[in-house]
Amino acid sequence: MNSCSCGEAKGHIVARRSTADGKHVLLHSDGSLTWPLGYSIKGSAFPRTEAQRTLALRAGWLVLGEVELHDADAVSSLVAAARWVAERSGLPGDVRKRLAAERAPRPAWQVLSADRDGKATCRVWVLPRMLYPGGLAVWHERGRYDVVRLAHAPAIGARSRDAYETTGFTSTTLRGALANVRRMMAC
């Protein structure tokens, strides 16, 4: 393999960045991405030809440009998005678009009430604040999904308790509720 642009003929670390939770990601001169002890990151390229090396380096730099915004558990999906963008000669903003298109959040429902058989009759899903700022949640009761906003209301004993205010967006499906959330974010 040819030498690096710095003139070093052997493989070496070109750059190091930290994830949002403090884990280091290393980019090597051949374009491979590893954790500090040399373990490869899932989805990282290990090129054999010069064309593959160029593509892997482009993807590696795209990853390092975005890695500080993500936790370590999201790095492999970031690598996959960066490799997809690098193959199409995309720009750094395209990596974020690809990640947003891939990542649909999984509901983590909190059951507020259940019937005698244990089936949830009322539940709420507080949306991830990094994807949906503004303290938004989805309230599900009697087959209806309402987009609500988290508000803190005073309670007895001067303790604050979570309360939810309606936004006026209602749907009969979760997919429709998330579409309403996206409409709200676009405004």
Image (cartoon, rainbow, N blue to C red):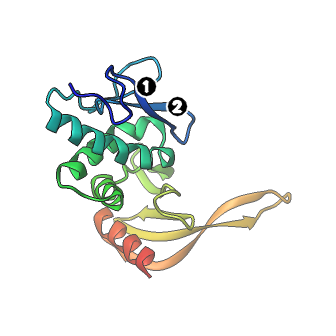
The answer to which of 58 and 149 lies nearer the viewer is 58
The residue singled out by tag 2 in the image is 23
Instruction: Name the residue located 47 percent from the left edge and 22 percent from the top edge.
Output: 36
Q: Quadrant of residue 160?
A: bottom right
Q: How far is disc 2 from disc 1 in space, using C-alphas?
A: 8 Å
- The answer to whether 182 appears left or right of 31 in the picture is right
Residue 108 visible here: no
Q: Quadrant of residue 104?
A: bottom left
Rendered location of residue 131, percent (x, y): 46, 59
Rendered location of residue 177, percent (x, y): 36, 69
Residue 99 visible here: yes
Q: Are marks 2 and 1 in contact (CB under 8 Å)?
A: yes
Instruction: Name the residue located 42 percent from the left edge and 50 percent from the top edge.
Output: 120
- Residue type, label 2: Lys
Q: Secondary structure at mark 1?
A: loop
Rendered location of residue 176, percent (x, y): 30, 70
Instruction: Name the residue located 33 percent from the left edge and 40 percent from the top edge.
Output: 60
Q: Residues within 10 Å of mark 1 (few under 14, many from 20)?
A: some
The residue singled out by tag 1 in the image is 35
The N terminus appears in which quarter of the rendering?
top left
Instruction: Name the residue located 71 percent from the left edge and 58 percent from the top edge.
Output: 161
- Residue type, label 1: Trp
